[in-house]
Image: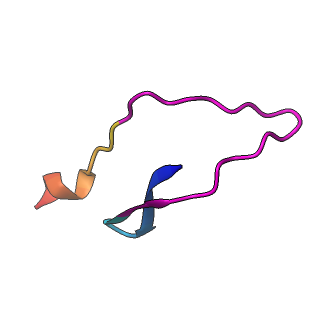
Amino acid sequence: MQALVYTDTQTLIYREEKNPELVNGESIIKVSASGIWDQYQLQS
């Protein structure tokens, strides 16, 4: 799966990640949309 990952402060990388494995007591959900708010951009 593709994921947007924070690797450092204000550093995002779009990369391939392993698909999650189902663990007892947890659920896997399909996310259709999401958003990221950058609080640092507002302070500049």
Q: Nearer the viewer, residue 6 or 16?
A: 16
Residue 38: horizontal and vertical position, in percent? 26, 51
Residue 43: say if magenta: no
Q: Report if residue 15 lies within the magenta region.
A: yes
Spot occupied by residue 22 in the image (x, y as percentages of width and height): 79, 39
User: Quarter of the image holding residue 26?
Assistant: top right
Residue 41 vertical position relative to residue 9 in the rendered view, above or below: above
Q: How is the image coloured?
A: rainbow
What residue lies at 10% left-to-right and 61% top-to-bottom?
44
> Would residue 15 appear left or right of 30 to someone viewing this image?
left
Q: Give the tally of numbered discs.
A: 0
In the displayed orientation, state which residue is furthest to the bottom: 8
Q: Quadrant of residue 24?
A: top right
- At a point 17% along the width and 56% down the height, the residue shown is 41
Q: Is residue 23 left or right of residue 39?
A: right
Of residues 31 and 18, the one drawn nearer to the viewer in this rendering: 18
- For this view, does 21 lie left or right of residue 9? right
Seen as rendered, the residue at the extreme right is 24
* Residue under the point 43% across and 27% down: 32
37 w.r.t. 30: above or below = below
Q: Which residues are magenta?
A: 13-34
Q: Position of residue 16 (x, y in %)?
A: 50, 60
Main SS type for the magenta part? Answer: loop
Residue occupying the point 56% across, 58% down: 17
- Residue 30: where, in percent of width, then height? 56, 29
